[in-house]
Image (tube, helix red, strand yellow):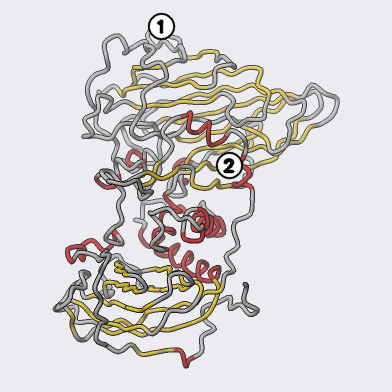
Amino acid sequence: MRAERLFRVLGLTDPALVEEAMETRARQVEWKRWAALAACLALAVSLGFGWRVTGGFGGYGSGDSGGDSGSAGVSGDAPADGAPADPGESGGGGSGVEEGITFLSYAGPVLPLTTLEDPGPLAAEREVTWDFSPRANSHGETRQWGAEVTDAYVLRNDTGEDVTVTALYPFPGTFDSLPLVLPRITIEGEKTETALIAGPYSGGFQPTIGAETPDTMNLETLNSWEEYKALLEGGEYLAQALGEYPALDTPVTVYRFSDFAAPLEKYQAATQAVSFRLDESVTQVLTYGFNGCEWDEGFRRYSYFVPDGKRNEPDLKLLVILGEDIGPYTLQGFQDGGCNPGEEIEGVSCTVTRSETTLDAVLDQLCAYYQERYARSRAADQDNAFNVVPFEMYRGAAAELLSQYGVLSGAPMDRYMDGRLDDILAETMSHSRVLYLRFPVTVEAGGSVGLEVRFWKEPSFDYGCSGSENEGLQGYDLTTRLGSSLAFTRQRAALVNTENVEITGQNFGFDLPGGVTAVELDLEQEHYYLEARPIEE
């Protein structure tokens, strides 16, 4: 039942609820389940809770490396060249594998323009061009990595009345990658204003590598165009993208930890732990800024490394209680994040402030805090994604993730069931999703309108040192009609500035040695792919 009175800001706090934390004797518990941070993780605070697993080294192998597929290439850490192409598949471009290589990192296809409404009498022509010039991406690398794509359309209206539609241009990406991959749209050569729309996380979850029982700890991004087809066909994904973000007006109790003190000169990983009992049937706990958690039935202990002003760790520490409040708590200092018996220390203290508010208000505060930290973490030459992603979109997407896959879903994924809001906020930025640019188009009676969509397209690839025979190859593909409401009468594809690449596999029909760099596409064929290898000078 909703509370009759809701506090919308955390500042409405009764001074009587401010408590100066005192060091107390830690509660003795016989642990039935253990999930404490190892002491050695004191040197890796930014990794979060000790049991967070992403799979592989640095996330590779998990299907999501904390960015979208191919983020290693975006950052300049592209895969190294590998073995030469199979005999007969270089130069002119053999057929390769019938449906193309399944790369370890899949960047997603070039998707066709669509409209929000029924386009009615409009007919469409399309031509997609890949420009393989070096320095195509914003990093200005001298080698060829990725391609500049021009997805051009002509919309025709053969009727006697003007037709106005709301166009939607879909493209795979992440919030983090938007400064690099955001399309630029012109209509009849003039730049047009667009509105950004973000779909939810487009992937799923998979078991931890080597897990004896199935779990949903790891992310699993889309790995093929068929998976994009399953995502976008039917319209449910677009409907969610166009819908409202969830409202989180649930009343919560918040414990904020501040004014930290500890003998950090002696214990560099000095840790503060807070312990309490709760009824798990009526109470849920969300955290922000905590590094470890241990629990037994009806008992919890959360801990964090005392901020020293040097580690890349938030100084904002919150326990957010949903449902009935927790019971009395105790605070205890430890030498490090292991919080092991016998390693208690004196001199660790903080101030705990209790307040009542709503989860919406908490999320507002945390998203703003994360946005500031994100901006400070950017180097002078790095793009800030929040210059492109509106705050309300980011905040709404975080609420969406928490509601769809987190503890508010009723059946949370293992990855988020511990209630760490740090993970929700960070992975909202790095989750792969389909985004849309929305803009109006008017085609006069008996006329036509030309529009162009230009963007840098990352390739699909296999990670360097993966041992794959496909290291060094770059994959590109497109779909001819997936998710589009337009009636296409013609589609073409073209390649330009191909001096630095050789085609190793395709189903387009290009023949670079023979001078065939533009081809007609079969409108009945849903998917086309191209695999290329840069030619080293």
Image height of 142 relative to 210, above or below? above
**167 left or right of 495?**
right
Count the numbered circles shown. Answer: 2
**Location of mark 2 (residue):** 237
Q: Secondary structure beneath disc 1?
A: loop
What amino acid is found at the position of numbered circle 2 in the picture?
Tyr
Image height of 275 relative to 383, above or below? below
How far across and how far down the image is residue 483, in percent? 60, 32
What amino acid is found at the position of numbered circle 1 in the picture?
Gly
**Location of mark 1 (residue):** 514
Query: What distance separates the C-alpha of mark 1 from that of mark 2?
Result: 42 Å
The residue at 40%/15% (across/down) is 98
Disc 1 packing (10 Å; few <14; some 14–19; many ≥20): few
Viewer-closest of 211 and 131: 211
Q: Which mark is residue 315?
A: none
Disc 2 packing (10 Å; few <14; some 14–19; many ≥20): some
Task: Work out which quarter of the rendered image holds the C terminus and state it.
Answer: top left
Of badges 1 and 2, nearer the viewer stands 2
How far across and how far down the image is residue 129, in percent? 50, 24
The residue at 29%/61% (across/down) is 46
How far across and how far down the image is residue 458, in percent? 41, 34
Mark 1 or mark 2: which comes first in sequence?
A: 2
**382 left or right of 401?**
left
The residue at 64%/21% (across/down) is 125
